Image: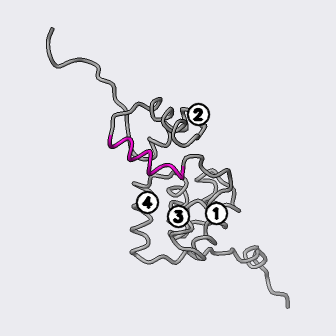
Amino acid sequence: MMARINADDRAPPRMKHKPLPLTEEEILKLEEIVRKGKDWRSRDRAETLLRLARGDSPKVVAEAQGVCTQTVYERRQQWLSKGFAGLLDAPRSGAPGKLSAYLSTIEEWAKTSPLSAGEMHQRLVEEFDVRVHLNTVKNALKQLGFVWKRTRYSLKKP
């Protein structure tokens, strides 16, 4: 006697994806990064991890975020090996900063006297013989937290 085989019996079992194991504290920190993180890459990576923790498959996560599934797998692996440090970008190669050795001096000059970026540039050339573009000096000042605002109108009436 032959047994009947259903179509369901012949189909391979569906693969269930295990949710990414996260503690409640980790979930709260990742949600905070998604809401208020400064770097869009870190926010994107944190969102990937939260979706994986909810049980979404890597394919669904990849389609929702517009990345390939390999990226989702790599983000998961970075999380498992490095934790929150895996959310940040790795250091990249490149030329060292031209003014990094002079940042403390530039900051001191900017705090002691009201110099414009052009005057600061000229002073660097005269005292240290540092030849950089004016925009490099401006970027260094921005990096140090200095801002320029022009006065639009006087409070005194003429």
Residue 120 disc label: none
50 with respect to 67 (left or right): left
Badge 3 is on which residue?
51
Q: Amino acid at mark 4?
A: Ile
Q: CA distance from mark 3 to mark 4?
A: 14 Å
Q: Amino acid at mark 2?
A: His
Q: Nearer the viewer, mark 3 or mark 4?
A: 4
Badge 4 is on which residue?
33
Badge 1 is on which residue?
72
First along the sequence among labels 4 and 2: 4
Q: Nearer the viewer, mark 3 or mark 2?
A: 2
Residue 133 disc label: 2
Check the picture and name the quadrant holding the N terminus: bottom right
First along the sequence among labels 3 and 4: 4
Q: Amino acid at mark 1?
A: Val
Q: Quick one: label 1, few (<14), some, or many (20+) residues within 10 Å?
A: many
Residue under the point 62% across and 60% down = 91
First along the sequence among labels 3 and 2: 3
Q: CA distance from mark 3 to mark 1?
A: 10 Å
Examine the structure image and report whether residue 126 is included in the region drawn in magenta.
Answer: no
- For the record, the magenta segment spans 100-112
